[in-house]
Amino acid sequence: MKNIAVIGAGTMGNGIAHNFAQFNYNVQLIDISQLALEKGIATISKNLDRMVAKEKISEADKVKTLANITTFTSIKDGVKNATLVIEAATENAILKTKIFKELDEVCPEDTILATNTSSISITQIAAVTNRPDKVIGMHFMNPVPIMKLVEIIRGYNTSDEVMKFTVNLSKEINKIPVQVNDYPGFVANRILMPMINEAIETLYNGVAGVTEIDTVMKLGMAHPMGPLQLADFIGLDVCLSILNVMHDGFKNPKYAPCPLLVNMVMAGKLGIKSGEGFYDYSKGKKSDTVAKMFR
């Protein structure tokens, strides 16, 4: 099994493609946008250059990794020989189910279909296919080539064979798989997102400022990054989407997104990706300058 198809050439998709290609898998990277594919390959190349500079890999390793990736703008063409397809499209249930319907139609019968969703039900996604036993969650962490963890999420109908295969595959690409069951937010986001939301509430209620909140969590709880800085890194729109999934799924008010988060997303202040969130990124991605709104 050496053929992996990855759908979506964005941050997570190109990271997953990079990771598999580095371990000598043939990767078919698929995106409907040719521009997104070009950007994705450019990102992989830049990340490999960093690894070469740090002497973690050789120039030959870089060339080999890039040669292992082929790009496609058609799902049908890209998944032809794949044993496993990993969907890493935008965190949107309607879009994901649409993709899985198509994958079920065009993939060989024995192809395993995985989703990199960070919160959407695997069982819900699997239900639109005729192979729910072969649908599984593989939630990679960002940045994929660096972060060791993969949450492996078993849907209601996921078979033991598919679970075992996915766990072993994760180990082959030097990841640490953790098996979890299919409930909103899984484990990572069920714990992380309420913490981020509470940090935003603390700011919203005027208890402390952006820098103060992040400093308390970094120095007091040994977090490498404060929750507001982390929210900017993840993307405030992604945080909001995950909180909405959990709020809808559990019907528990503790998962209700803070009004400040909702307003910021509506205003287009999404964090690093938009140039401003809780911090101002106009001078670069590694900024500790608090956004004008919160000074």
Image: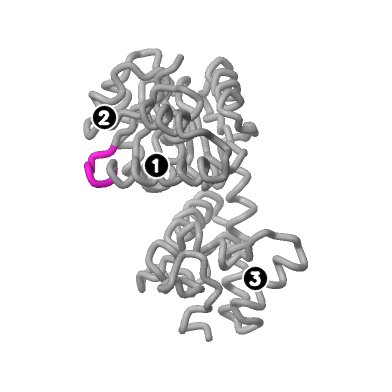
Is residue 144 among the parts visible in the rendering?
A: no
Residue type, numbered disc 1 = Ser
Looking at the rendered structure, the kind of residue marked 2 is Ile
* Residue marked by disc 1: 45
Magenta region:
31-36
Q: Which mark is residue 75?
A: 2
Q: Is residue 105 visible?
A: yes
Q: Kindly report the distance in space between the C-alpha atoms of the residues bearing marks 1 and 2.
A: 23 Å
Locate residue 97, reporting x and y percent.
Answer: 34, 37
Query: What's the coloring here?
Result: one colour
Residue 33 located within the stretch drawn in magenta:
yes
Q: Which residue lies under the disc numbered 3?
A: 214
Distance (Cα) linking label 2 and label 3: 42 Å
Check disc 1 and report its element: helix, strand or loop. helix
> Left or right of 92: which side holds 286?
right
On the image, the x and y values in percent for residue 102 come to 27, 29
> Up-down: is 18 above or below 79?
below
| Mark toward the viewer: 1 or 3 | 1
